[in-house]
Image (cartoon, rainbow, N blue to C red):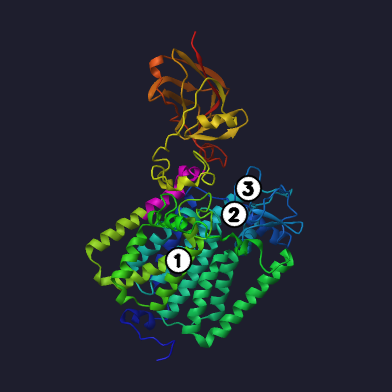
Amino acid sequence: MTATEHPVQPTQDWLLRKSARPRSDWLILTVIIVITFSIFWLSPVHQVTDSNYSLLLSDSLITHRTFTLDQYAIPRNPPLPQDYAFKNGDIYQLEWVRGRLFYFFPPGSSVLSVPFVAVMKTFGLSPANPDGTYNLQSEIKLEALLSAILMALAAGLFFLTSRFLLPITTSVILALGGALGTQVWSTASRALWSDTWGILLFALVIYLLVRTEIAKRDFAPELMATLLAWSYFVRPTSNLPILAITIYVALRHRRKLLRFLLSGAVWLALFVYYSWHYYGHLMPNYYLARRLSFNVFFEALAGHLVSPSRGLLLYVPVLLFVGWLLIRYRNAIESRALLWIALAIILVHLIITCGFDHWWGGFCYGPRLMASLVPWFVLLAILGLSAAQSRLRRIEVIAGLLLLAASVFTNARGAVSRQTWIWNTVPVNVDVAPERLWNWGDPQLLAGLLRPPKPRQFPILNGRVELSKPEAEKYLWYGWSGPEPELRWTDGHEATVVFAVDGSGKRVLVLRLSPYLVEGKLNQQRLSVKLNGKEIGELTLTRREPTTHSFVLQPDNFVSENVLSFETPDAAAPAAVEKSEDLRELGVAVSWIELMPSN
């Protein structure tokens, strides 16, 4: 038997007898794509951070035929390429190279998105305004639509791949679980992260591998090399799967190895030419390995696996069931080659990502840096379920379904709850205070369901506090938007201020505020003001103009650590009640708070 010959298993007979898939498969595939696209598109949280300007680069390729962004009216104050810290005024997504302005992150996603951006421009939706300024709102809309399309297609590929080994019902559950119970929903469908195109490309790669290994179809070296090359252009950590699959080709398809290598070499030569032409060296700055240090390897390893706000096993707990299947039914696994490819890629990826000091990935939800592994986890699930099939015990099925439900819940939180996104900055920026990643009392997935921990200090409130000023930050607990000129909005149905008092006696609390109103749609805002859980006043606000309100407080109203609450049951998002992209749930805008002695 040669290296490429395999015995035919009985479970594969139907694949070999048919030249095409059953019609029912294509119908179910369509339904899966429609359902997942609808869920992704309707999920309200969008995470456009690293991908800012990515589709502007697509527009530049269409309109100006260049990878530079010099022709757009963009502020020219980017940080150094290796700087990943969020700084006021910095545009970290851009970099200066030899006097020209570039998108800092990998260009692959922008290039692959060119056809989509070109089509959308014909409908009047473009990331660039006619005057050359950047249209962030259009970028967000375009990324939301494109990422939903791409991840719905990935869900369809999960289904097609699983059908090589699994029955329809199991394949449907696996495809929906892979789409809704992983970072596909909570991250990759929320914006055009580099992992978004990467997941689709690897879903295609895995489909071709399974088709070759299980269905005994011909291996296409040029196509495989092209998909792998573009996965690298999309995200440089794809060099790990490229190495693993190159070894696979050398061992299993050595007659086609040369064609595979030559195809990859052509794409690599074109990429090197692009880099040399624009950057003056062999690789763009983002692709250099200088950001790897391994200074916090063990903390990063633990964080990637079990951190309450980044841990893979907490945010995708169904992986525990997949691991159980692979161990318990290891002797019945259909393809050892596919198993070892997936395991090697996952292990090495985990090790490499532990080399980043900034291992949590900045502003994101859950284990974002593990998102590119989702197609490989799906492959392991296919192999595990195939090996178990008729031997699964009822307790195993129940446990698997419960873990899958938990995975869907955790990833749904990241896609539909704004509070989980706001968690990155409230009560303090996670990049400034990464110890928050280990706070089990404030896990990101439960943000909005649990109150964040109380501040360690309750500053003395004596006099007036302007909420738009930086000095106000120490008094604010949760439920507040960012500062604006002369005011700060409540965001959600409750906002709180914490403080201590100096001395005793009656005091007067004075508030200057204005409600969020929309004529004909939102004509009033009810406001309940509470101190330490006891209501001290109730207002119905019907005028937009700022008004001042006073409340007399008795000495017994105060405790050592006081919490002043603003409850706004009528708070609403401008995006829901008027033409706006603002997703904040606005209640009242507070200009200042003053606590003074009573006469």
Q: Earlier in the sequence, mark 2 or mark 3?
A: 2
Residue 256 to residue 319: above or below: below
Residue receiving disc 2: 51
Residue receiving disc 3: 136
Element under disc 2: loop
Q: Earlier in the sequence, mark 1 or mark 3?
A: 3
Residue type marked 1:
Pro
- Residue 350 seen from this side: yes
Q: CA distance from mark 1 to mark 3?
A: 30 Å
Q: CA distance from mark 2 to mark 3?
A: 11 Å
Element under disc 3: helix
Region of the chain picked out in magenta, as a range: 407-424
CB of mark 2 within 8 Å of CB of mark 3? no
Residue 597 spot, x, y in % from top left: 50, 13
Residue type marked 3:
Leu
- The residue depicted at 42 percent of the width and 54 percent of the height is 311
Residue receiving disc 1: 375
Q: Please state which of residues 324 and 191 is positioned toward the viewer in this rendering.
A: 324
- Name the front one of labels 1 and 3: 1
Residue 350 to residue 596: above or below: below
Instruction: Say whether residue 409 is magenta.
Output: yes
Element under disc 1: helix
Q: Main secondary structure of the magenta part?
A: helix
Residue 327 spot, x, y in % from top left: 31, 69
- The residue depicted at 73 percent of the width and 64 percent of the height is 278
